[in-house]
């Protein structure tokens, strides 16, 4: 039984149609591919101008003329009620609704039409098959967070079961928890690991300290996919040595799906089938291959919600070997997260704070940005940009979430600011530690 495909079909995501569409796109020859991209770019802009009042207001011109005149969208542009941003003919019940992780510090809610969501999953399935991983049959060891409220937790675990994923919650990465992780690998036939880079790296260091090779403990293991945070060369070498399988770098975002995935030649291939990825300078002009710039993404098929020339908040470089059909991400700059170390020895990845701040991220756009800083083993400071100070109720929700996801008896200070400090590339790092 193809459980993963069945789960998409039951939720009315047309995965069969999406896979056929992906196959047809991949058959387009290189010398015709730029024409395909230009046609889809023009088509999605004109569709949103006709069907989306929010985008018409953002565009500020009555008609599409040239691509360079299409405005660059920012996360801040999208921090308003979703109902104001949905295209005509779509509702929350007829589209896929998601929420960004907020790892950049600028969270928002987004929508995809169901075909686009299915096409994203068709892309993931296609890339995973490069390494003989089948989403319908291969068991995944998933190093991610998970909602801890009753209904959210149950929903996520049901999705995990259907999708052949077994969750390794990363809210506590102490030695004791790592021992339990190891026992699960000894008992289960996991085909691959998928998770946040920092969490997977901590597990690798734990195995290294015990002089263990995971492939010898779990012979069915074929692959390790890391995502959401930057992968450094030495960390990759360590992981590959202690896991005994290839380490693959994945770059994606919930609002656009798969952005780039490493092939068997260690080339980081950008998804050019349903996305158009540009590298722009500070004047929103495309830079030559080999030059660093801001990563700006267009979702070529999403009719429910415009994601057009969307500044994702990362910087990168396209390889000089890139072509229209096969763009290669030579370097991704940014996307690093620190680790919180608590007085009781508990180790918590920085991305855990997404689950904390999620408790007050609402579809109102009231919270624009936030950062969390650990300034002592038991002390944190949350700086945020919002129209108003956090209410006592909002503060209490965050404190309760910190107790649930991070730890007890921690001190938390709140400070509202007009702006937050960014690094040289303009990226806002959600979590930092002074320790």
Image (tube, rainbow, N blue to C red):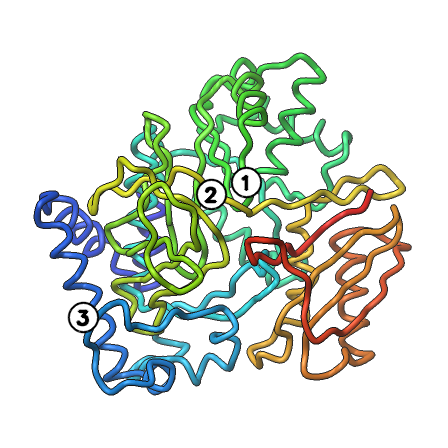
Q: Which mark is residue 43?
A: 3
Q: Residues within 10 Å of mark 3 (few under 14, many from 20)?
A: some
Q: Residue at x 55, y 47 (%)?
A: 334
Residue bearing the label numbered 1: 230
| Marks 2 and 1, how far apart at CA | 8 Å
Vertical relation: 256 (above or below) 48: above
Residue bearing the label numbered 2: 332
User: Marks 2 and 1: which is nearer the front?
Assistant: 2
- Tell me whether circle 3 and circle 2 mark residues in contact (CB < 8 Å): no
In percent of width and height, residue 95 lies at 36, 72
Q: Residues within 10 Å of mark 2 (few under 14, many from 20)?
A: some
- Tell me whether circle 2 and circle 1 mark residues in contact (CB < 8 Å): yes
Secondary structure at numbered mark 1? loop
Q: Which mark is residue 382?
A: none
Between 209 and 275, the residue placed more toward the observer is: 275
Q: Earlier in the sequence, mark 3 or mark 2?
A: 3
| Marks 3 and 1, how far apart at CA | 34 Å
Relative placement, left or right, of 148 versus 380 is: left
In percent of width and height, residue 86 lies at 37, 80
Q: Earlier in the sequence, mark 2 or mark 1?
A: 1
């Amino acid at each position: 039984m193809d459980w993963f495909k069945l789960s998409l079909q039951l939720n009315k995501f047309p995965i069969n149609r999406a896979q056929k569409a992906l196959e047809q796109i991949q058959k387009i020859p290189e010398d015709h591919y730029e024409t395909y991209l230009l046609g889809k770019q023009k088509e999605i802009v004109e569709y949103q101008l006709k069907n989306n009042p929010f985008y018409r207001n953002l565009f500020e011109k009555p008609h599409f003329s040239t691509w360079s005149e299409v405005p660059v969208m920012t996360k801040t542009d999208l921090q308003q009620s979703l109902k104001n941003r949905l295209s005509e003919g779509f509702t929350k019940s007829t589209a896929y609704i998601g929420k960004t992780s907020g790892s950049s510090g600028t969270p928002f809610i987004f929508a995809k039409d169901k075909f686009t969501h299915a096409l994203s999953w068709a892309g993931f399935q296609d890339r995973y098959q490069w390494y003989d991983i089948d989403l319908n049959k291969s068991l995944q060891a998933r190093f991610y967070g998970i909602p801890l409220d009753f209904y959210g937790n149950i929903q996520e675990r049901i999705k995990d079961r259907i999708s052949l994923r077994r969750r390794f919650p990363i809210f506590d990465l102490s030695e004791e928890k790592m021992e339990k992780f190891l026992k699960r690998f000894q008992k289960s036939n996991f085909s691959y690991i998928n998770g946040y880079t920092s969490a997977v790296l901590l597990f690798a260091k734990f195995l290294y300290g015990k002089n263990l090779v995971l492939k010898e403990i779990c012979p069915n293991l074929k692959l390790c996919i890391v995502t959401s945070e930057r992968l450094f060369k030495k960390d990759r070498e360590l992981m590959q040595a202690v896991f005994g399988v290839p380490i693959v770098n994945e770059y994606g975002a919930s609002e656009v799906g798969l952005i780039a995935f490493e092939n068997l030649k260690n080339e980081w291939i950008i998804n050019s089938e349903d996305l158009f990825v540009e590298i722009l300078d500070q004047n929103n002009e495309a830079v030559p291959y080999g030059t660093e710039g801001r990563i700006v993404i267009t979702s070529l098929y999403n009719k429910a919600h415009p994601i057009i020339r969307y500044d994702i908040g990362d910087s990168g470089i396209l390889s000089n070997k890139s072509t229209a059909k096969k763009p290669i991400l030579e370097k991704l700059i940014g996307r690093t997260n620190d680790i919180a170390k608590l007085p009781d020895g508990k180790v918590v990845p920085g991305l855990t704070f997404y689950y904390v701040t999620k408790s007050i991220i609402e579809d109102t756009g009231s919270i624009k940005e936030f950062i969390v800083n650990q300034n002592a083993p038991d002390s944190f400071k949350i700086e945020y940009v919002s129209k108003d100070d956090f209410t006592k109720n909002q503060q209490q929700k965050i404190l309760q979430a910190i107790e649930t996801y991070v730890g007890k008896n921690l001190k938390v200070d709140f400070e509202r600011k007009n702006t937050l400090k960014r690094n040289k590339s303009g990226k806002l790092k959600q979590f930092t530690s002074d320790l």
